[in-house]
Amino acid sequence: MLDSDNWMLYNTSSGAWVTYGWFINPANSGIPFVSSFYNAPAEGNVFVIDPLALATTTNPAALSRYPYPLGPTTNSIPRLTLDDGTGTNTPMGQLLADRIFTWQDDELIELNADDPDRRPEQVYLDDTGAIVAYSQTTGNLLHRAFDGAYSWFATVTPALNPDGTSDMNRYNVSIVVCYRRDLQYIDPNAKPATERLVNVTFPGGGYGGGDAALSLPGTALLGGAMPSYLNPADTEQVSEYLSVRQNRWMLVYGWELLQAKDPSSSRGRWVAKWYRVVIADDELVEQDIDKDGDTEKCRSVTLAGPDWDIDNDGNGQPDRYAYGVLMDNVLGVYTKTIELDRGMVRR
């Protein structure tokens, strides 16, 4: 998974899958990246590796960025898949993605309703496509059947050296574990999206996460208009959009100018960090986030995780504002700094 030669992105301009060596190259202007992604090629970028979602959808263009349904905007993250290993630059299919990115240990058993004292039987998938108990199969057994309630994807973020640079080989890799993740991405105007972009404000400075306020993003971040189901003046609708459960996880990301670490640098990079939601208030509150005299509906939460230490204005205090992604079913996130299997050299 961490061999960058295997990373593939759907190019919405050409309607084709491209490899990492293609889309990291600024000369390929057809890719729907904003210029800020190319202002820092030496510092790498943030990616979401999510073959299961991209293999399940019939519309890879809609899921080529994270969070869905933003599409290729300045505030979304590239969502990548992996090639299928055939050497033909073909993206991973659903069967292979399901086998790799779905946990298979929640095996199914069948109880005998007529004889409750009878031992439960293991359930199998056979070559006829049937999922049946061992004693009832009529075909050749392929493997034990499993519920598949748990699945995972990954985020990768460049790990900076002390001088604010990166050799593009060291990344902070987060494995994100989901329970019964909804992969049926439908019209985002029909229901609150499975992945929801929010604004995140850190009134306490972002130390260890800490206190934060979640609010609706501006219409410019949502493609120019709010989803048709969402009325910013409707407290119930806003509360549903900003819903997050205690002990679930959310992603916070933002743009960091490297001048704060290296005054000679004019580059920047996206930073993404996962936080556990320790407390989430039930009721929304009105807050003047922008300090402009206008209030907006917010949900107050307490987050636990790394410091949110982006300081673009150089005032010695972490920036108050960031973007967040709410997902209803993230049970755990496991992060480790590792080296990629190969150097991320642009070809």
Image (spheres, rainbow, N blue to C red):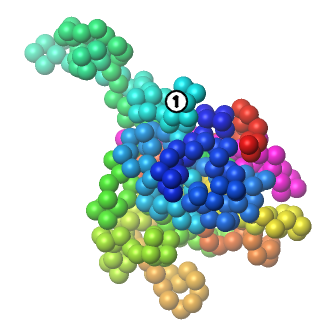
Tell me, yes or no, if residue 252 can be seen here.
Answer: no
Q: Residue furthest bottom?
A: 293
Q: Where is residue 306 shown, x and y percent of the image?
A: 67, 54
| Residue ID at (45%, 53%) | 61
Q: Is residue 161 magenta?
A: yes
Residue 229 left/right relative to 46: left
Identify whether 252 is placed above or below 173. below
Report the front residue among 111 and 167. Answer: 167
Say what secondary structure mark 1 lies in: loop
Q: Where is residue 255 shown, x and y percent of the image?
A: 67, 65
Query: Could you tell me the amino acid type at mark 1?
Result: Asp
Q: Quadrant of residue 69?
A: bottom left
Q: Where is residue 97 shown, x and y percent of the image?
A: 46, 32
| Residue ID at (36%, 15%) | 143
Q: Quadrant of residue 228?
A: bottom left
| Residue ID at (75%, 67%) | 257
Report the front residue among 296 and 74. Answer: 74
Other residues around mark 1 within 10 Å, as few (<14) / some (14–19) / many (≥20): some
Tell me, yes or no, if residue 79 can be seen here.
Answer: yes
> What quarter of the picture does the N terminus occupy?
top right
Identify whether 171 is placed above or below 245. above
Q: Where is residue 328 shown, x and y percent of the image?
A: 41, 52
> What quarter of the picture does the C terminus occupy?
top right
What residue span does the magenta drawing correspond to?
A: 158-180
Residue at mark 1: 84
| Residue ID at (38%, 40%) | 56
